[in-house]
Image: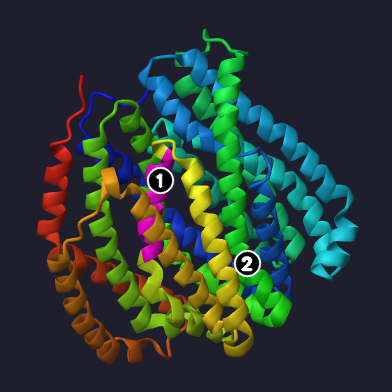
């Protein structure tokens, strides 16, 4: 089920090849879809749509006590043991928890839509959208559970293929609504809902043909007290960690609403959408790391774990440099292309925080490693410390220095989280940064930044929005090619190191 016979280099390259091939198609589709939707509906309507999506995302973290996250931890271990009864059982526990709690919460959304619309969103526009997203809530949890299974068995092709089908059909339906002049918040919401359920059917078909018939048709679901207790204990710890993480991510937003106003909160929300752009590129790496860490941990391969952590930490610092300088050069153009110039302040907020983005990259590696080796409790402790730290800084900064410094308070929190996680892992999994390569990249891209800013930025100032989009995409490809060229030795060494980590047959 998992390609255990292959070297780590083959596993990484093969898995990430499909992750990035599909991602390079899906990311533009997602942003083109957002551009189309934002064209004909008002700012207030767009605000309602995004806040409902945000609410659905927030509630989903409470939805199953995080049993689906346990798939990534337990399934690689049970597959290694060839115990398919346990694999099927853990998947069943996850689906049962997801469907049961999803239906309950969706019913709440559906029947209490009037109350939520008037008292939380403070607009009647949200009422019908909430009822549509009640059904979306059930579907997205089923879709994500099966996709979490694909991630757990490191099947990046199936995972991204199903996501590709869902996104491409959403784009087609949104284009239909847009071109035939049916643009409305309700019609766009139905577009998302209909094609989600078609995506679920495609996902279930792939799961049945590829895994159920081959591995699970003759296996049974175990109702063992010890297994349920083991999965439940891990899930509970991850659930606590998830709630603390959500609390940390929401502190700045809720304090902005409390201390300032909703307009400031909307600008800050838009900034959060911008800051997530680099994670669209890196998230495939983070997704595949935890199952691999878990698989290596079950085999007591600590040396391999350390080498992987070391290699990726250095690479992520370099990746941060290229993202940082590209956004510094073209932030006005990117702001206009993706979110119109009316959200200019969102990009000013970005300037206060992007220098600290690297610490979020690094803590993602540490937290995936801690989850892979079963140290979820330590993640919870670290996040509680960060919450207190973040709350105090936001209380000081927001009132006196507006939303700009709210982002800075959050990123100071990321520094603290990375430092504490690094301190915990230092004994067995310390990181030694290659400052020679880091300094070379930093110096080169400062010079490149000056050149791009002088020659290319003025050219984009008066272009039409769609032309600017494709011009920026072309410049980003050029920027990336330069990055790969000057770091070709680093990538060769990385592949060489990973090739040495052979799996035992």
- Examine the structure image and report whether residue 360 is included in the region drawn in magenta: yes
Q: Left or right: 122 with respect to 250?
A: right
Q: Position of residue 349 (x, y in %)?
A: 51, 81
Q: Which is nearer the eye, 78 or 181?
A: 78
Q: Residue at x 37, y 49 (%)?
A: 424
Q: Which is nearer the eye, 245 or 272?
A: 245
Q: Residue at x 24, y 87 (%)?
A: 450
Tell me if residue 470 can be seen: no
Q: Earlier in the sequence, mark 2 or mark 1?
A: 2
Q: Position of residue 325 (x, y in %)?
A: 31, 77
Q: Position of residue 21 (x, y in %)?
A: 34, 49
- Examine the structure image and report whether residue 339 is included in the region drawn in magenta: no
Q: Which is nearer the eye, 100 or 402?
A: 402
Q: Residue at x 63, y 46 (%)?
A: 195
Which secondary structure is most common in the magenta stretch?
Answer: helix
Q: Left or right: 346 with respect to 323?
A: right
| 364 up-or-down from 206: above or below | below
Categorize mark 1 by other alpha carbons within 10 Å: few (<14), some (14-19), many (20+). many
Residues shaded magenta: 359-371
Which color scheme does this rendered protein use?
rainbow
Quadrant holding the C terminus: top left
Q: Position of residue 397 (x, y in %)?
A: 57, 83
Task: Assign a secondary structure to mark 2.
Answer: helix
Q: Left or right: 373 with respect to 218?
A: left
Q: Residue furthest top?
A: 218
Quadrant holding the N terminus: top left
Task: Assign a secondary structure to mark 1.
Answer: helix
Quickly name the residue at label 1.
368
Quickly name the residue at label 2.
251
| CA distance for labels 2 and 1 | 23 Å
Q: Residue at x 60, y 42 (%)?
A: 239
């Amino acid at each position: 089920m998992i390609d255990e016979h292959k070297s780590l280099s083959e596993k990484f390259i093969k898995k990430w090849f499909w992750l990035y091939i599909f991602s390079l198609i899906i990311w533009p589709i997602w942003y083109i879809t957002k551009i189309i939707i934002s064209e004909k509906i008002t700012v207030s309507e767009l605000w309602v749509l995004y806040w409902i999506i945000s609410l659905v995302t927030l509630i989903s973290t409470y939805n199953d006590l995080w049993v689906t996250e346990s798939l990534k931890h337990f399934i690689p271990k049970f597959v290694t043991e060839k115990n398919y009864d346990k694999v099927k059982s853990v998947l069943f526990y996850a689906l049962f928890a997801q469907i049961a709690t999803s239906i309950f919460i969706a019913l709440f959304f559906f029947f209490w839509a009037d109350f939520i619309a008037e008292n939380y969103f403070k607009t009647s526009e949200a009422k019908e959208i909430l009822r549509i997203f009640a059904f979306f809530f059930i579907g997205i949890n089923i879709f994500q559970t099966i996709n979490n299974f694909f991630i757990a068995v490191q099947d990046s092709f199936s995972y991204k293929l199903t996501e590709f089908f869902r996104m491409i059909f959403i784009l087609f339906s949104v284009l239909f609504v847009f071109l035939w002049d049916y643009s409305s918040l309700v019609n766009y919401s139905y577009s998302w809902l209909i094609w989600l359920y078609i995506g679920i059917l495609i996902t279930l078909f792939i799961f049945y043909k590829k895994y159920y018939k081959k591995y699970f048709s003759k296996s049974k679901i175990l109702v063992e007290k010890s297994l349920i207790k083991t999965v439940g204990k891990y899930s509970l710890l991850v659930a606590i960690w998830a709630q603390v993480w959500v609390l940390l991510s929401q502190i700045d937003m809720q304090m902005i609403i409390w201390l300032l106003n909703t307009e400031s909160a909307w600008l800050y929300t838009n900034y959060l959408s911008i800051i997530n752009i680099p994670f669209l590129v890196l998230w495939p790496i983070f997704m595949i790391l935890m199952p691999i860490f878990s698989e290596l941990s079950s085999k007591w391969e600590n040396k391999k774990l350390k080498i992987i952590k070391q290699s990726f930490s250095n690479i992520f610092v370099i990746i941060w440099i290229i993202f940082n300088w590209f956004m510094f050069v073209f932030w006005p153009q990117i702001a206009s292309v993706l979110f119109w110039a009316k959200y200019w302040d969102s990009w000013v907020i970005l300037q206060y925080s992007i220098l600290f983005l690297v610490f979020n990259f690094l803590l993602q590696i540490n937290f995936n490693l801690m989850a892979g080796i079963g140290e979820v409790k330590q993640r919870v402790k670290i996040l509680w410390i960060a919450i207190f730290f973040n709350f105090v800084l936001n209380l000081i900064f927001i009132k006196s220095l507006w939303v700009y410094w709210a982002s800075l308070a959050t990123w100071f929190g990321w520094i603290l989280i990375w430092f504490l996680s690094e301190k915990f892992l230092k004994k067995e999994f310390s990181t030694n940064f290659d400052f020679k390569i880091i300094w070379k990249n930093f110096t080169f891209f400062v010079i490149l930044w000056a050149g791009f800013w002088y020659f290319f930025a003025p050219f984009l100032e008066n272009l039409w929005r769609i032309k600017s989009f494709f011009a920026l995409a072309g410049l980003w490809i050029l920027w990336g090619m330069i990055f790969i060229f000057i770091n070709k030795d680093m990538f060769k060494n990385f592949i060489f190191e990973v090739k040495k980590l052979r799996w035992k047959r």
